Amino acid sequence: MQFIDVHTHTSSTQKDVFSIENKYPNSKDFSKPFSIGIHPWYISEDSLQNDLATVEKLVISENCYALGECGLDRISATGFSLQLEVFKQQIQLSEKYNKPLIIHCVKAFQEIIQLKKEIKPKQPWIVHGFNKNYQIALDLIQHQICISFGESLLKNKKLQETFLKLPLDFLFLETDTSEESIKNIYKTASELRKIEKQIIIKTVKQNFSRIFKR
Ligand SMILES: [Zn+2]
């Protein structure tokens, strides 16, 4: 059984781990499964057109599983309206090339939900690195947005309570920039839910097949 890590910055070398490694327009190696996007922290007005063209060129690759991470971040130095514009352009690419969208969101969940309602995308959306409250999680799920949990699940008590109450068919797990092993995150998820680890592995795998169509 494979442990799926839906969002990481360092892809695993372990045979029983399948990871989607996050790449940027200036990344070099695209030989392993990846996602590519312009992160709201790294929007440069000077290189924006080039960066978008690079994303568009790479997103069609068979190894590309998703567009992103991209999104909205209220505490980023990049102006919010520029972030919004760049995010919308990447939503269009996700739709045009039929790749799911991996979303980075900080203090902008209502905007993400609003965009989902306006644009009505055909491609699935996944909010990664979720560490907010139950109400926000529920809002996202009610709008068919998947949620990926990472390292915070290991220690954040409130997040653990939220995790317990959520339906599992919108769930993903990830390591993001953490050094934590994805297997440990699966282990914690299964202990919290008091179900076998195999069931978590199977559920995430089913979600993965449904969302990524692979
Ligand atoms: Zn990340």
Image (spheres, helix red, strand yellow):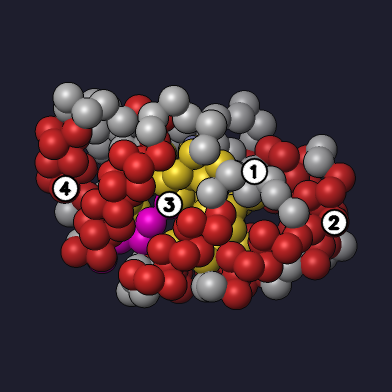
Q: Of discs 3 and 1, which sits in the foreground?
A: 3
Which residue is rendered at x = 35% and y = 42% of the image?
81
Which residue is rendered at x = 44% and y = 25% of the image?
77
Which residue carries the number 4 mark? 56
Q: Residue 30: percent from the left, percent from the top?
A: 25, 36
Q: Which of the marked residues, 1 or 4, is nearer the chain's N terminus?
A: 4
Q: Tell me: 26 left or right of 14.
A: left
What segment is highlighted magenta in the picture? 98-102
Q: What element carries label 2?
A: helix
Marks 3 and 2 sit apart, C-alpha to C-alpha, by 24 Å
Near-viewer residue (24 or 202): 24
Residue 101 magenta: yes
Q: Residue 136: percent from the left, percent from the top?
A: 67, 60
Marks 2 and 4 sit apart, C-alpha to C-alpha, by 39 Å
Mark 4 C-beta closer than 8 Å to ligand 1? no
Q: Are marks 3 and 4 in contact (CB under 8 Å)?
A: no
